[in-house]
Image (cartoon, rainbow, N blue to C red):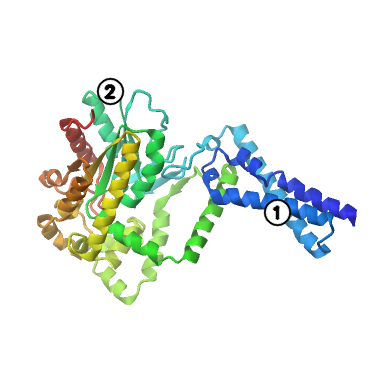
């Protein structure tokens, strides 16, 4: 009996060679998950629990059935740790860049990931660097450079074009050619985001990269609307659902970084097939009224959704929120008032983050077709765009938020209204700027930065 207890104890102690806080530090310290407190706590619990279990086994407290269960758990722990060590050995032998991910939590995206977006309107690739930004590899220390960070959603990210044609990178080239030789502009955009998430990204990114200037690209109406819709989604999630969702996310990320060389996260993701599956599934689940609404869409729009050539997120807006523009262009609507209050809070916090890191902050109002007259085919509600162009309340809302927080403000609406050919600057169905559209955004921002001496 005592010899069997020794065997059980040896297996537990072998497992604890991996499942302890020191080993966790040595193996995971250079991965983004090392900052997750829940995993630290888990390793401490396993280690302390394992030591107590060995003591209890030596005192012969457990029966054979319990010992066999403990042995199985210990064996699985040893097997898991062996695979992790093999994965690390593969990384060392191959010199894989994925073993060199910075210790801090990734900034905006999964580091070293890649995705290709190929539709009938565009074909472009999003390559994410080791810091988790859609940009070239960046030295954390800026040296003598004047560094600008650009936060925003898909319009700042450069959706629809390769990185060199996104407005932050075109802005960098514009400033370089206009005599600012030491300038560096970094793209910190991410699709689907809004001021509440820009603030969170800034909390990590600004203290690390120490920019001289931060530009926040706030999309006309969309950022305001998302402050309401995302708050509603968050409030509808109960504590149990939230705990399960977060727990699942932690487990997935732990597995991913335990076997980062086996799983090869740098594999190119083809987005179009994912879009097609998602849109097809949503359309098949439509209720009767949703099917009726979808049938009123332009035939080309319907076809593009079904074939995966338009983002499923647009389908959700078009079907379930057709009055979105009318609501958030109305400054007196309760939803708009709520969003204005939230955006004011976000900009106050963003301003404080920048101030504490000796960075200046500028509010950039990024224009949409609804308010500028540019041609994008979306839904039958497009007929109202001329009304919104004439009755634009968004710009005054954004301007007021900037003034309230004493933040410089740049507005591009009139510039885009003044562009002659309204079909040359945005993708006809997707609605994002094309190469020419991003160039207009970048050059206008660059001119204003120079004219107003914001680069001093």
Left or right of 201: which side holds 55?
A: right
The residue lying at 59 percent from left, 44 percent from top is 262
Residue sitting at x 39%, y 71%: 285
Please tell me which residue lies in front, 452 or 322: 452
Q: Which residue is mark 2?
A: 181
Report which residue position mark 1 lands on. 49
Farthest-out residue, bottom: 288
Task: Identify the mark at residue 292; answer none if there is no mark.
Answer: none
| SS state under label 2 | loop
Q: Secondary structure at mark 1?
A: helix
Viewer-nearest of discs 1 and 2: 1
Mark 2 is surrounded, within 10 Å at the Cα level, by few (under 14), some (14 to 19) or many (20 or more) other residues, namely few
Is residue 304 among what the camera can see? no
**Cα–Cα gap, marks 1 and 2:** 59 Å
Give x and y (percent) for residue 292: 27, 73
Left or right, 46 with reference to 40: right
Q: Give coordinates of residue 199: x percent, y percent.
A: 34, 47
Vertical comparison of 238 with 118: above or below: below
Q: Are marks 1 and 2 in contact (CB under 8 Å)?
A: no
Location of residue 227 with respect to 18 vertically, above or below: below
Residue 267 appears in view: yes
Which image quadrant: the N terminus? bottom right
Mark 1 crowd level (few <14, some 14–19, many ≥20, 10 Å Cα): few
Instruction: Answer with the quarter of the image where residue 447 lies.
Output: top left
């Amino acid at each position: 009996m005592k010899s069997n207890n020794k065997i059980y104890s040896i297996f537990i102690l072998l497992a604890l060679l991996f499942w302890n806080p020191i080993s966790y530090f040595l193996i995971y310290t250079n991965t983004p998950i090392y900052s997750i407190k829940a995993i630290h706590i888990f390793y401490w619990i396993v280690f302390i629990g394992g030591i107590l279990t060995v003591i209890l086994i030596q005192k012969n407290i457990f029966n054979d059935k319990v010992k066999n269960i403990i042995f199985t758990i210990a064996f699985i722990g040893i097997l898991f740790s062996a695979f992790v060590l093999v994965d690390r050995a593969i990384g060392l032998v191959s010199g894989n860049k994925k073993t060199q991910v910075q210790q801090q939590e990734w900034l905006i995206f999964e580091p070293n990931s890649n995705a290709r977006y190929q539709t009938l309107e565009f074909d472009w690739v999003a390559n994410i660097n080791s810091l988790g930004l859609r940009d070239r590899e960046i030295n954390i220390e800026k040296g003598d450079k004047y560094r600008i960070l650009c936060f925003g959603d898909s319009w700042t990210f450069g959706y629809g074009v390769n990185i060199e044609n996104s407005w932050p990178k075109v802005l960098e080239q514009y400033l370089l050619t206009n005599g600012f030789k030491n300038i560096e502009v970094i793209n910190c955009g991410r699709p689907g985001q809004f001021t509440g998430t820009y603030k969170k990204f800034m909390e990590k990114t600004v203290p690390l990269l120490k920019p001289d200037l931060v530009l926040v690209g706030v999309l006309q109406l969309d950022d305001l609307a998302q402050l309401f819709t995302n708050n509603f989604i968050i409030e509808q999630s109960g504590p149990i659902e939230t705990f399960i969702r977060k727990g699942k996310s932690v487990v997935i990320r732990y597995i991913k970084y335990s076997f980062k060389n086996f799983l090869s996260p740098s594999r190119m993701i083809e987005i179009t097939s994912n879009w097609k599956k998602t849109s097809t599934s949503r359309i098949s689940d439509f209720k009767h009224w949703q099917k009726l609404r979808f049938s009123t869409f332009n035939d080309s729009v319907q076809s593009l959704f079904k074939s995966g050539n338009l983002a499923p997120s647009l389908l959700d807006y078009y079907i379930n929120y057709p009055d979105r523009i009318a609501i958030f262009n109305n400054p007196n609507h309760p939803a708009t008032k709520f969003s204005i209050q939230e955006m004011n809070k976000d900009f106050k916090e963003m301003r404080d983050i920048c101030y504490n890191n000796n960075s200046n902050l500028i509010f950039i109002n990024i224009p949409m077709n609804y308010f500028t007259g540019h041609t994008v085919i979306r839904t039958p509600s497009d007929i109202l765009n001329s009304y919104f162009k004439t009755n634009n309340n968004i710009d005054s809302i954004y301007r007021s938020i900037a003034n309230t927080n004493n933040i410089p403000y740049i507005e591009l609406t009139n510039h885009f209204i003044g562009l002659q050919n309204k079909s040359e600057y945005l993708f006809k169905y997707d609605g994002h700027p094309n190469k020419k559209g991003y160039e207009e955004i970048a050059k206008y921002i660059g001119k204003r930065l120079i004219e107003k001496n914001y680069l001093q």
